[in-house]
Image: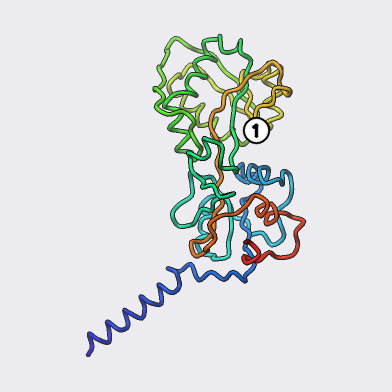
Amino acid sequence: MKKIFIFTLMLVALLTLSACGGGSGKFDAGKNISIVAREDGSGTKTAFMEIIGHKGKADPVNVIIQTGTAGVLAEVKGNPAAIAYESLGYVTDDVKMLKVEGVEATVANIKNGTYKISRPLSIIYQLPNITDEINAAFFTFLQSGNAQRIISEEGYVSLLDNSADYTINGALSGSIDVSGSTSLQPLMIKLAAAFENLQPNIKINVSGGGSGTGYKNADEGVSEFGMISEEFNPEKAPSCTYYEVCKDGIAVIVNKANPLSSITMDQLNNIYDEEVTTPIKWNDIN
């Protein structure tokens, strides 16, 4: 009898846990959407808001701000009504990624341009600069297997497959200035550090200022390379061309209990619009 009683208690506990979705709760389409956003200053936030049409705008009313990837994922995992965004490379199986306009957030779809919430991160430069051995060495490194591994490890989308590793030239010494996009800046700092480890007599100076600064400094010769986080616009830097370092893909995520599979750009625009003050319920998303 004792064994039967213990087994019954274990079965009840197991069924209770299953009913609760492993601690994430049940989804209720009649509840208001819990809008989750990254902190101000986040490159992911800046990119996402710009792509969905809210560049420079404030967060919507009652937004839940989470600092860093871990906070975003924890909030969505534990909140059945949540929606959020995060760099594709950092999303775990604890949450569910939505399709956008019916297209899955995959590396392949970001590479072929069918997944809409992505953007290029590029460097721009004057062609004569690449004739300089030091600049040419760094440019070659950015296309190397060494760089592609760092790009992937940092959660960005590498655009080059099977690139050869960088070949060190011990005779080189000097410095290179890279400036511009604050979205590309953190990755560029890591790439620069890796290059300096291979070429210790070359110093890479990486500074921000935004894409506008990247265009201006490269065009005027202030920096050997400018960083931009948008499609290259030759009118902004007539003397320059560009190289796409990688793509920044951003996934839209919800709780795993949420039955929704796809969302549109218009719906995302509406959800994250600061001017929409009436709460949006999940059953408003069809």
For the point 72% across and 60% down, the residue is 61
Tell me: residue 152, above or below residue 216. Answer: below
Residue 8 shown left or right of residue 135 in the figure: left
Percent coordinates x, y for residue 277 in the rendering? 75, 62
Total numbered labels: 1
**What element does badge 1 sit on?**
loop
Q: Residues within 10 Å of mark 1 (few under 14, many from 20)?
A: some
Tell me: residue 108, above or below residue 19. Answer: above
Percent coordinates x, y for residue 208 in the rendering? 65, 31
For the point 51% across and 47% down, the residue is 104
Percent coordinates x, y for residue 166 in the rendering? 41, 20
Judged from this view, the residue extending furthest toward the bottom is 1
> Which of the two residues, 91 or 159, is positioned nearer the viewer here?
159
For the point 63% across and 35% down, the residue is 182
Percent coordinates x, y for residue 71 in the rendering? 54, 55
The image quadrant that residue 233 belongs to is top right
The residue that label 1 is drawn on is 230
The image quadrant that residue 4 belongs to is bottom left
Judged from this view, the residue extending furthest toward the right is 275
Quadrant containing the C terminus is bottom right
Quadrant containing the N terminus is bottom left
For the point 63% across and 56% down, the residue is 65
- Say what amino acid the circle numbered 1 marks: Glu
Tell me: residue 147, above or below residue 13. Answer: above
